[in-house]
Image: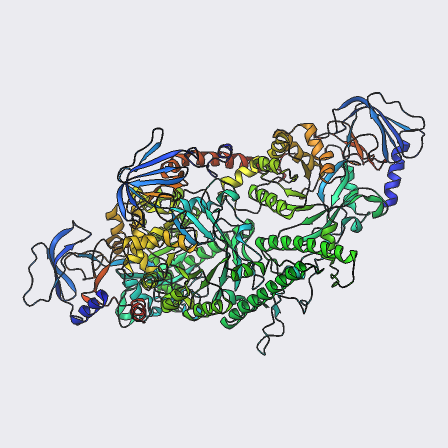
Amino acid sequence: MKLAAFLLATAAFAADDSFVLRNVTIHPVTSADIPNATLVVTGGKIADFGPKAAIPKGAKVIDAKGLHVYPGLIDSASNVGMSEISSVRESGDVNELGDFNPQLRAVSSVNPSSDHIPVTRGNGVTASLIYPGGGIIGGQAALMHLDGWTWEEMAVERNITMQMRIPTTTTSTFSQTFGAGRRPFAETKRRYEERLKLTGEFFEQARAYQRRKAAGGGGFTVDRKLEAMLPILEGKEQLLVFAARERAVKDALAFAAKENVKIVLAGVREPGTAVKEIAERKIPVILGETLELPLEEDSPYDSPFTLPGELYKAGVTFAFGTFSVQFARNLPFQAANAVGFGLPYEEALKAVTINAARIWGVDDRIGSIDKGKWADLILTDGDPLEGRSQVKQMWIQGRPVSLETRHTRLYEQYTKRP
Amino acid sequence: MKRRHLLLAAAGAFAYGQTGSPGFYAIQNAMIHPASGPAIPNGTIVVRNGLIEAVGPSVPVPAGAWTIDGKGLHVYPGLIDALSTWGLPAAAPAAARPATPAADAPTGRRRGGGDETPANVQFLDDGGPEDRPSNTSWLKAGDLVQPADATLTAARNAGFTTAIVFPSTGVFAGQGSAVNLSGGRAGDMVVGSPVGQYVTLPTRSTAGFPASLMGSIAYVRQIYIDAEQYKAAKAMYAQNARGLQRPAYDRALEGVLESPRILLPATRKVDIDRMIRFGKELKIPVVLYGGAEAWRAADSLKASGVPILLNLKWPEHDRDGDPDAVESLRTLETRELAPSGAAALSKAGVRFAFYTTGLERPADVRRAVKRAVDAGLSNEEALRAMTLGAAEIYGVDDRLGSLENGKIANLFVTDGDWLAERTNVKMVFVDGKKFEPAPAPAGRAE
Amino acid sequence: MHRRKLLSGILLAPFAAYAADGTVVIRNAKILTVTKGSLEGSILIRDGKIVEVGPNVNAPAGAKVIDAGGQYVMPGIIDCHSHIATDAVNEGAVSVSSMTGTGDTVNPEDIGIYRALAGGVTTANILHGSANAIGGKNVVIKMRWGKDTPEIVFDGAMPGIKFALGENPKRRGGASEGGLNTRLRYPATRMGVEDVIREAFTDAKAYKAALDDYNARVAKGERLIQPRRDLKLEPLVEVLEGKRFVHAHCYRADEILMLLRVADEFGFKIRTLQHVLEGYKVAKEIKEHGAGASTFSDWWSYKVEAFDAIPYNAALMHKKGVLVSLNSDSGELMRHLNQEAAKTVRYGGLTDDEALALITINPAKQLAIDNRVGSIEPGKDADLVIYDKHPLSNYAKVQKVFIDGQVYFDRDTDMNERAAKAERKKALAEKQKAAARPAGNGRRPQ
């Protein structure tokens, strides 16, 4: 019933993007928390906030006594909207065929009607970096609001980074018929070196293309794959490089240095001695699920839990990504779990808000409660990273967004079953 | 091949330029290691008619024997490979699977049928234990041995005189036989048969049931239950057939019932403990094989009284593995400590023997035994593990495994300690028949 | 302790090996009893059992006193669905694999046990996989890390068996890997799954009837050959006789209801419905049948039958009177079932005690071990977890875990031992790398 009441309340002011929250504890993330404060949203943006912020005349005022307002959470890596049922190939649009597909764009394959979008929103996530995969270069990721009638309306930035998977030397194989198996290292190594070489060659071709284009003149024809690489070569766009283990991370770092491109590391799990270099070169990292099993039998049982804290201590900038569809709603818990194992709470919160926005260069618009930023906000009854808390209300660009989901609908429907 | 062996033997005899009755030898003044007791310096051993006639420090040389001056030589019981496929056809007959499941199999699934089923489709669910898949329990290795197999000669040249050979394909692969490594016909070679049922426990298979470790174990259990019921039913029927349903003849169960013991795989301590318990449950004598983690299972083995065959192919670094991969402490410790297993077993008083599966060259076998010795096993115990120990485990120690009066004259003669790098095997006696390996090429000890 | 020395770090004997008859007091704790509310106070443990719980308990002289420092103590977590600690999960070749069981393949050295322990789990139901309409038998274990199989098995737990409905058991009825797999297995539909179960129980009844008939006639003095004991049908007879629990993997409401009705017809009970993601749709029928439900907190959409899964499932079923637990089915999820429980507060508004019951007393009841474990009450096993914060907080971490009053996990000890373990590993790795380094000819030095 409580939930239904909220949904009704939502509908009441669904048309506007201006309102005032009163008697609320504000957690701006970029500055100290403010209890019993007022937050003013005008035209979808944060106009003012503070203990004494003036309430504009005629403003719609919401009394949020006992509640808390936070910036909407940002998932720095997901496939939300690109896959509906993971076991059904037909419902998936993440992995294209081919090794090099920089021309592919995730943005237009994000299904705004996906049931995963409201479900993810339900736990306070307002924006998500949605990436494609497949091959070595999977295509361009988009930063999307988790609300909109179309993907155009959802897009915060259409092409914000390029997904790339550094070739690795894994000797384990898996087949439906034979299960887990092993491939000889010599074969793995050959394949790995060949793929690294291919990657280098692809970048070489892109540079040659860049020179040809700059030189102008006759005979120049557009190559859409290579054209898509130009923002990377020009340093205008970051490569989102997936690398989990120490060797892959080191390869990624070496690759970035050699090619002189900006990278963000993704899915780092056991970086070992590479941490120092990551910190020194100020390379941002997108961390995956905190609650993972260690990769090695002998790794400390809590090694995945302690990684965020260790990176923080080493001075690495990072944000959290769920790298998931069905678990994208667990982003806040992912951040919380790092807190128990050494990450300061404020840093955990930043890693799903402002640090994410900074890494993606959108901190002028989202990531914190600051004047002039978009009103991507969540109203909660407590710490949004805690499992037992509730998200009571959400706004994206000042618009109230429904927290109803496929799940709440089924819940209500079957609660009523006699 | 047979002829060549004989020629070699003859040549050896003539080399000594003596006269004597065929198959009648006396080796004098040798260092004799009987395996059943302490070494005998300057001892004499007499071999006649394929048997050891006498052995000791002051045995007179009987008239008519070919005498061999054993000065500087060592005499050992012939080595026994405690689990082997030497001399067997490369691929043992595939375990029989019914082409179609028995129509009246009580629990077999009906087929799906229907027009949509493609013609080439096979149905995986061909039933379970009652169809006796992967089972050739009735095969006897002794019947399959090929006397002309070149591996027999190579093994013999390294001092091996006996192998306990088993068919090796299938969950119930078949029955083992103790075979001497010389003979014109398989029948001449068999010293004891059957000595046990060789069981494997496949952990994955795409060929049908059992396709997992749990399936394999369940299958073996059901077979032994069936065998007991079969035995009882047959006995009842034999006593008085009138009025009784005839128990259907089942060769898979016949094979199991014939086997005096069962060989079960056990590599890790977990496997060893599991198989000890399983053996107890099956209520038949069990011999384990594998034993890479026997170094930490001596207590369980001792308590159970179950003997174990240790594979001399000690765990090695995976040559196909990623050289930078971090191996688990468990893997590293097992690799480090596996060769110490023999010493641990010996200390605990566990019956054990060595086998050589996976080792290609005689020198590798010697080195592998040497590693066990370096890890604390005494020379005597090492010799025992390759001679009398194996014979005892298979219940053929009344005829094999040591240099004692009346036992089969299987022995080998070296020019030094058998485990030393530069030692050469000078002579090998199998069933009292003498062979002399060709000398090793200069500069190579193997 | 001997083992601990050898395998530094892998196989730890209980850290603080108090004598089994030792007396332990945990004082200064926030005690979440789950069944009797929460209090600040102490717990007195003797002979591995909880003796007294209260604000003040008298610590007898000589008792080991553990100061919880104001931290939280809750009952050890019970996972009603796990596949850790077993060397095999599925026997997939047959549609009915009831002859198999995880009890045959327990691996007490699986690192998953230690990791689960570090996540506060003290008891788990180790189930067969879901590849078969009727799967294998299960085993309930306690996480007594460092002990051998017989000692980790939960003594006296009711035997059970796994069933599976829906996509998993019918998966092998269809082509996979681009249609390459032409070895199909019946069934391919939910209808077929029902058929397999019905036929198996029809067979089981006939088997039971045949046994009864035999016994009756033999009792009358007839001379008959004993029927074959069938390990496949025997557990199903036990199910019919109420001597074995059914733990049934299921997703959709239709198949859940189907199974309940099949069970009703054959006259047996489904003890737990596992996963049961659409259980909320048929909570009424589940309650009426008396089945328990063991589900995930928030998994959904990973397959078609999981698309109507909702995170309110546990709360909704609970509110409709079903006995509900949360399980992991995963060695990873198993490590934070407390946080999974916390989600039921968010999704469906359960109270803290209701949420904690989902991972303690409720699964204990489902496994019929609630007389021993599942809450902090006098007379129960001292299986306890100390958390630094409220266990339903995402910031809480396990500090100590007790089983039978003995400490099996201690975070400080774990951290303190890391360096030594890493050192030993490094030393061994370097030593072995050096030994394996190829000489000039690519072989080890001769």
Corner quadrant of residue A296: top left
* Res. A103 in view: no
Foreground residue among B263 and B121:
B263
- Number of marks present in the image shown: 0
Q: Is residue B300 left or right of residue B238?
A: left
Residue occupying image coordinates x 61% and y 35%: B302
Q: Position of residue A337 (x, y in %)?
A: 31, 49
Q: Position of residue B84 (x, y in %)?
A: 72, 44
Q: Position of residue A351 (x, y in %)?
A: 27, 52
Residue at the extreme left of the image, as rendered: A57
Image quadrant in which the N terminus of chain A is located: bottom left
Residue at the extreme bottom of the image, as rendered: B115
Residue occupying image coordinates x 59% and y 44%: B277
Please, which colouring scheme is shown? rainbow
* Res. C331 in view: yes
Image quadrant in which the C terminus of chain A is located: bottom left
Residue at the extreme front of the image, as rendered: C220
Foreground residue among B262 and A296:
B262
Q: Position of residue B324 (x, y in %)?
A: 49, 43
Q: Is residue B429 left or right of residue A402?
A: right
Residue occupying image coordinates x 71% and y 32%: B384
Vertical relation: B146 (above or below) C304: above
Foreground residue among C127 and B232:
B232
Corner quadrant of residue B319: top right
Q: Is residue A292 left or right of residue B377?
A: left
Corner quadrant of residue C438: top right
Foreground residue among A11 and A284:
A11
